[in-house]
Structure formats: structure tokens, C-alpha cells
Image: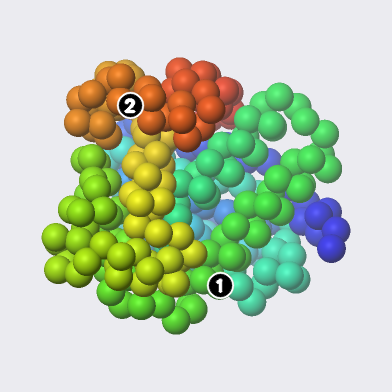
Amino acid sequence: MMLETVKYQNGGRFTSREEWIHPARIGRSYELIVMIEGEAWIEEDGIPFDLKEGDVLFLEPEKQHRGYRPSDARVSFYWFHFDEIPKDFVTEIKKHMQPFDRYTVFSLCRQLLRCVSMQYDPPILHALFYTLLGELAMQGRQAVCERSPLAVRVCEWIRINSDRVLTVNDVSEQFGYNVDYLSRLFCKTYGHGLKAEIDRRRLDDMKRLLLESDLTLSAIAERTSGGDYKLFLKFFKYHEGITPSDFRRLYSEMHTNNR
């Protein structure tokens, strides 16, 4: 399978500073929009799409695109233009989807834009964009697989409560099942246990705040580690191998446009 089955053209991160509405235009290429913050309302040939944080939308060429309602709050999203969706992914990528692992999608977007800013050769950019599309296809495929309703509820509860320090016992008490049973069920559905999911969500929150906000490290520690700054540093370095400051610095360069 060749990676050059998609041609990345350009991209960036858009952030509004005031009321904003998507301009009316006819696309000349495919466009991928990945919502980071806020809400946007976009039509394609009269079909409306309400985009919220984490949503992904593919806009097609030779179709009329326009906003049908202004956003009165801050809006931020990644955008990428490319030539076509590879045949490998046509049946798996959904036109409008909500990835269950949005941080991985955000991370791939940011990595691609960092490489763009560092002027990597086009074949590398094509390959990175292909990887991003592959991640979306994989998440689209897994979303339709049969999953335990209880495991899905547990996963969502962990996500919602990942802004505080959680333990497997907290999950057990919340749902009234013993830890071993929940962990086995979770592993069968998602391929990893409860502890790994708790750590993953917590780490995702840390990385999201490091990359997508201007919060200080102390403020991020307050949100993700109960205010324990040393615990925040230790946890992050153990899982990522670098300090939060180095991680933020590593991904600090990318093209941004705003209004």
C-alpha cells in the first residue's frame, strides 16, 4: 500500500476573535475541518452541519459551502485542503463524525502543521496526512463495531470526570461492579483495562491543555492533578518521557490564521 495516495495541499489552524460565519464559496478541493473549540454552522449545497468541539467534517469540491448561522463565541478549528479521499478509506470515513479519541486526532493535526512550518518535503506531508485520514477511518470503523453498553457508559463517565484524579475504585463504586469484572469487560471492548483508560484520559487532558491553551503549568496541574504540581510533572514525564514544558515547546510552531 503506497502512502502517496493522497496529496496534501495546505492547512492551518483558524481562530476567531469576534463573531464569525463561514464565507460562501465553491470549493476547488476537498477540505477537512476538525473542530477544537466553540461551534460552527456550515452548509454544503444546502445540507446543514452543526459542528461542535471534536467534530470532523469533510467538505467536497465543486459544491457551495457557506455558513448559515454566525458564531458569537470563540471558534477554533484545524483545516486542511487535499486532492481526494483514498480508496482505502472511502467506505470508512464518515462525512460528519465525532471521533471517540479526539486527542489523537488533534495530535496528528498539530504534528502535520509543525512539519509544514518546518518545510518538510511534500512526500512526508502527504504521508502524515494519510496517517491522519487513516486514524479517522479506524475510529469510524470501530465506532460501528458491537460494544458493551456498560463499557461505553464507563468510558464516557471516565472522560467526563477526567478533570479530577480518578482511581479504578472510583469507577467501581460509581457503577456498582467489582474492579476485576469492569476491567475485563472494558478490555474486551476497547483492548485495554480501566487503569490504562484512566491514565490515557488524564494524559490526553494534560496534553490538550498544553497544546490548545495558554494556561500555566500550575493551572494545568490544578485541573488535572488536584493541584499537586510535583505529581503532575512526575506523571507526565513517566508517560511521555519529556517534561510538560518540553512537550509544549516541541509542538509550538505551526501556521495559524485568525479573524
The quadrant of the picture occupied by the N terminus is bottom right
Residue 97: image x %, image y %? 46, 65
Left or right: residue 55 compared with residue 38: right
- Would residue 136 be found to the left or right of residue 118 on screen? left
Q: CA distance from mark 1 to mark 2?
A: 34 Å
According to the image, label 2 marks what residue?
A: 232
Q: Which disc number belongs to residue 141?
A: 1
Q: Secondary structure at mark 2?
A: helix
Residue 42 seen in the figure: no
Name which residue type carries label 1.
Arg
Q: How many marks?
A: 2
Q: Residue at x 56, y 37 (%)?
A: 110
Residue 55 lies, with reference to residue 142, above or below; the image says: above
* Crowdedness near tag 2: few (<14), some (14–19) or many (≥20) residues, C-alpha within 10 Å: many
Residue 158, quarter of picture: bottom left
First in sequence: mark 1 or mark 2? 1
Side (left or right) of 32 relative to 38: right
Residue 25, image x and y in percent? 56, 54
Name which quarter of the figure residue 48 lies in: bottom left
Q: Which mark is residue 107?
A: none
Note whether 33 is above or below 147 in the view shown. Answer: above
- At x 35%, y 51%, the residue is 195
